[in-house]
Structures are given as C-alpha cells and as structure tokens.
Image: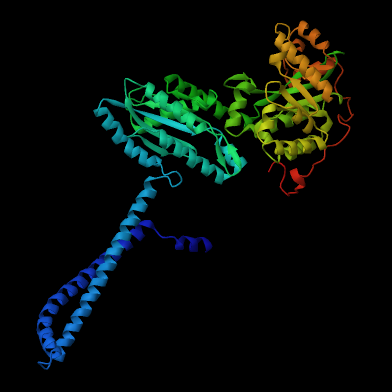
Amino acid sequence: MQGQSKLAGKVNPAAKLANSGHSALRDGAHDTITLGIAFAAIILFVGTGGKALPPAIEALQGRGLGPDNLVVSALLLNVALILFGWRRYRQLSEEVYLHRQAEAQALQLAERDPLTGFLNRRSLSDASEELIAACAARGEAVALLMADLDSFKQINDLHGHVAGDVILQQCAGRIAEILPDRSLSARIGGDEFACMVPFDANHPERIDELASALIAAVAMPRQTGETQIEVTLSIGVARSNGVLPGNATQSDFESLLHAADIAMYHAKRQGRNQYFWFETAMDNELRVRRELEAGIRRGILLGEFVPYYEQQIDLKSGKLTGFEMLARWNSPAFGIVGPQVFIPVAEEIGLIAQLSEGLIAQALQDAKAWDPQLTLSVNISPIQMRDQWFSQKLLKLLVEANFPPKRLEIEITESCLHENVGAVRTLLASLKNQGICISLDDFGTGYSTFGQLRELPIDRIKIDRSFVSKLINSEDNATIVRAISSLGSGLGLPITAEGIESEEVLKELQAYGDFKGQGYLYGLPESASDTTKRLTGLNLLAAPGKPAQDETATAAPAPGGRQDSKTAAG
C-alpha cells in the first residue's frame, strides 16, 4: 500500500502537459470573452459618454438639470468593465511573460549542464551534426577533443564533492576561455568534457596547439578553501576527415566521440597529462584492454590469481630468512601473466583490493606450513592505503588464517606517503601496534624525507632494484647505495637490497654491512608447490603436529579507536 501511495503521488509528465493544455484552452476562451466584453464596454462608453457628459458639464456650470441617472449608471458600469478588461490584459501579459521565461528555463535545463553551463551530450550531438555539415561545405574539418580530468575520484574522496564541483566549474571556465570561435563544448560525464572545433584541414597543428594549451591551463594550481589542488588533463583527439574505429566510414558525432574516447584512454595509459590523436592501432589496444578487464574480473572469481614466492636471504650468512609474495595470473587465455600487466588494470577498474586480499589469504595459508622463523612479505597498493578500514581487513585475514602478525611484513611504496600523510601514519600505527612489520619499498626512487622516516613507524628500507642491478658498472648507483646504507645504519633501520643478479653485486653489498637481499641470483620466483619442495629439501617446514605460529592475531579497533559492528571486509 505504501508503494502504491508513492506511485499515486507522482504526476505523469504527459498527463500534466495535457492538463496544462486544456487549462490553457479554457483560460484562452475566458480571455476572449473578457476582451469582447471590454471592447463592447468601450463602444458603450463612447455612446453613453456622449449623452451623460454634456448635461453633466452644463449642470456643473449651473445651466441645466444634469444627466439622467440611468445614463450615469450605464456610464459607470462601462468604466468598471473597461478597468476590469485592462486589469485582465495586464495579468495576461504577465502570464505570457512568465510562461516564456519558464519555457526558456526548461529549454536551458534540457540543453545545458546545470553545473558548468556547457551543453549536455544530447545537445552536443544535435549541434555537432550541423557543425560538421557546415564545415564540410566550407572545406574545413572538425576535431573532437575528448578531455578527462585525471584521478578526479581521488579529489572527491580527499576533499569532498563540493570541492570537486568547484574544480569542475573552474576547469570548464578555463576550457571556455581558450576554445576558438564557432567551437562547441559539452560536459558529457562526471569529469569528461567534449569540444568540437572547426579547423583548416591543411593545418592540424592548430589542434595540437589548442590541446597543449588546454592541458597547460587546467594544470595551473587552484585554491579551494584553504587547500591548493592540482589537476591534470588527458585528451584524445579525432578528426572528421581522419581514420575512425572499426569499419566506420562516416564522420558522424558518435563515431568521432568513440575515436576520441579511445585516444583519451590511450593518453591515460601512457602516463596522463598529455594528448594523442586517434590511430587505428589504438582500437586494437583498447580491444585487448577490454579482454584483460573481463579476464581479470572472471579470474578473481575463479581463483586464477596465485601467489609466487621470491627468496629473501641474509647476505652475511647466506641463510634463508623468508619470502616476498609476488602475484601471478594463471590465465587460460594469456598464460602466466606478470603483475606489471594486470596490477595497473586492476587498480583502474577498482578491483585491486579484492585481488590483493585474495592473494594475501592464500599466501597466509601457504606460509603456515613454513618454519616459524621464516617471514612473509606482501606488497600493498597505494589505493589500498587510502582505505581507512584496510588495517582491519588485514587483521581479519590474519585471524582467519591463525597466522602470527610478527611473521608478516607489508611493503608500501614512497608514493603512498605523499597522498595523505596523516591518514597513512594512523593506518601504519594501527598495523604496527599489532606486531606487523612495515617496509618502505623502492626506496630512492621517490621523495621520502628524513623527517618522514623518523616520524612514520617504518621497520625496514628496501633499496630499489634499479640501483642494485647496476651497482658494479655505475659509480652513481654505488654512491646512492652506500648513502642509503649509512642512512639505514644511522636511523637503526635494517636494509633489504632487491635485484641481486650476480656474485659481483653480492660481494659489493656484503661490504656495506648487514643486508638482506633477494634477486635472480638466488632463483626465480616459485609457485607454492615448488616453494614447499624447496623448503622440504632445506628441512624448513613446520614440524608435523606443531603449530606454525607462536602467537595469535587479534582484531583491533578501527583507526581513531572507532568501533563498528560491521566486519572488516564490509
């Protein structure tokens, strides 16, 4: 009954329009009658006035008895009818004015984006067909520029949707200032803009200049409240006299939009904050990308993503101390796929947390069978670090696996430290309080400061493989590694070196101090079954019947001490 009452309260737009039309007809009929009465009153006023006014004037001059009372009454009635007609005429004029205003406003809402004032997608589609035809008749071409703000969701998440709306308005204003005359601009999505620009087909460099100017203008820092926000723009360009995706042969709006959209996503994959013209190879690239996305979604559900393990060795003693878990995709279509292929895609489509948590859960089960002295390192995506519930989710996995937190080491990259240092500090402190070790991965490639290393609960530094692998042949790299070694020693932070691939590099690192190391010198990353075989040969599996852990993980309060009845995965 409640649902029915809600439906009953809704007004059908067609019925509302019909009712308003019938009302307008009735009002029009009444106004016609009123106008006829007023017109008749004016005629009668002239007639009665001619009979009443002269006697009235003579009476005022003392020369007569005055007009007849009936004539005076008729005259006054005519005056009243004329005043009534005039008032109704004014009301009708005002109603017509307001009606036209309402129509203009409705047309504005139907054609324009209310936030930026740009055209909406439907209006751009209608207007672009006329523009393309007009330019073709004049021997010109039309370029469609598809522009998308980079990482706009992150801006909304960190600064709120109000700040996000302000950014969109400011970006739209900067785009409008730069576009040449006769151009069309539209907001066709949350943070997507499309611009139709006529140009001389013999001078496409004008569009290059325009795209570069748009990127530079949007990239200028802007102030939102007390926060300065920097935004970048990725642009894809398609032209009406150029190649189109698939078998399209006609340069209509939808074909151009599809081509520009493909080129824009190519710009994002190439590093963002740049533009590309559409090329047919991009269409094939996008097709592969879509197959990857579909495969990742399916693979997560089917358990196709599996952990591989890379040995971590104490360089002084040569003793195996643990493993770093590395993700692999055992895809039926693509074979064994490395993380450099699927991790960026999983991050972009919002599946990295689900993928990572599934891999960690598998790795914890595998590591339970190892000797209790062996540690497990796992890499954490910067996207996961933005989740205030991440520590709870990780601790929930530890509890479910009955795995001791002190045997787990999470590795974060330096880029995590610059997005929201306060939130990262809180999250890391929550993990640290449970006994989990924190390692700063790829050290030397980012912008970490000494202050951050002192303030954040970092337990270990990992030197990036780009410095270690070329240690022998590059004095600069050797200097950097020595400096990091001294820094770690001064701060009391142990160091792990990645990318050890030769005996010469190993001997050089052994001279720097107490290091742990990993790399292809010790073997390629191995599957769980091969790792078990290796540990069996080294007698480093947990004794049968003996628990693989010496303490039990316990759940901790959410960041800030907040309690919630939801599960950590919720």
Name the quadrant containing residue 357. top right
At 72% across and 17% down in the image, what residue appears? 525
> In the image, is 54 to the left or to the right of 253?
left
Report if residue 67 is visible in the image: no
At 40% across and 40% down in the image, what residue appears? 121
Please say if 551 is above or below 536.
below
Report the coloring of the rendering: rainbow
Name the quadrant containing residue 63. bottom left
Please say if 104 is above or below 254.
below
- The spot of residue 56 in percent (x, y) is 14, 87
Q: How many marks?
A: 0
Q: Camera-side residue: 265 or 363? A: 265
Quarter that holds the C terminus:
top right
At 75% across and 10% down in the image, what residue appears? 521
Report if residue 247 is visible in the image: yes
Please say if 503 is above or below 404.
above
At 79% across and 8% down in the image, what residue appears? 508
